[in-house]
Image (spheres, rainbow, N blue to C red):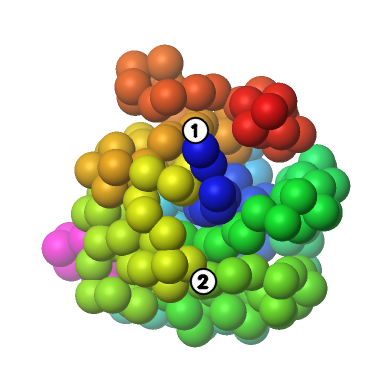
Amino acid sequence: MIRAVLFDLDGTLADTAPDLTYALNQVRGARGLPPVPLAATRPYASQGARGLIGVGFNLTPGDSGYDALRDEFLAHYAANLRRDTRLFAGIPGLLDRLEARGLPWGVVTNKAERFTLPLLDLLEVRSRAACVIGGDTTGKIKPDPEPLLAASRALQLAPDACIYLGDDERDVQAGRAAGMTTAIAMWGYLNGQAPETWNADIKLEQPLDLLRFLD
């Protein structure tokens, strides 16, 4: 029986792609480069700085100049966490319904706490979350299962009593390794991949579909 619901943040709980793209385009603009359209960045937004720098500059971690671009990008993002970021349609209603059922919910994300916690405050949901595990909370990031196991410990529940919703293959890998039920948020970014190959337990077309699964 599912007794708690855990959400990935970027691409699952909240649509953060517009503000991540804004930060990227500030970095590009400082170099005289034209803005990258949201349609080009959106599929990779779940990868955070790595994904955005990859789209905007065709660089990956370890490449010359990557670290400086990442730091500049993150500084712009920290100053613009909620220009256009919103909870996905259906998420506010889902959170209300979960709470009405007495089901705790939490957030497990690879986004560092210095962005995650203030963003959840700006979205006015941090105080409602039963736990928040960021990318630097445990020293491990997904697909390692430790962040999810830390969440289950915080909830004082066995991992198999939790379901984890995410929009990236790493989310499914981490959830399965932790022994949780896994669900793909099909409204998310999906990293330009084919989610039917991820071996998740369920696919959810919209947030409120979770209620039918829980029933």
Image position, residue 81 (x, y; %): 66, 73
Callout 2 secondary element: strand
* Residues packed near mark 1 inside 10 Å, few (<14), some (14 to 19) or many (20 plus): many
Image position, residue 75 (x, y; %): 51, 82
What is the number of the mark on residue 127? none
Quarter placement of the C terminus: top right
On screen, residue 81 versus residue 78, left or right, reads: right
Residue drawn at (39%, 26%) of the image: 200
Residue to which mark 2 is pinned: 132
What is the number of the mark on residue 183? 1
- Residue 71 visible from this viewpoint: yes
Q: Nearer the viewer, residue 71 or 196?
A: 196
Disc 1 marks which amino acid?
Ala
Q: Nearer the viewer, residue 143 or 152?
A: 152
Image position, residue 170 (x, y; %): 32, 43
On screen, residue 201 versus residue 212, left or right, reads: left
Is 165 a magenta residue? no
User: Which numbered disc flags the more N-terminal residue, 1 or 2?
Assistant: 2
Q: Quadrant of residue 156?
A: bottom left
Q: Nearer the viewer, residue 186 or 159?
A: 159
Residue drawn at (36%, 37%) of the image: 172
Cα–Cα span, label 1 and label 2: 19 Å
The residue furthest front is 1
Magenta segment = 60-67
Callout 1 secondary element: strand
* Residues packed near mark 2 inside 10 Å, few (<14), some (14 to 19) or many (20 plus): many
- Residue 170 visible from this viewpoint: no
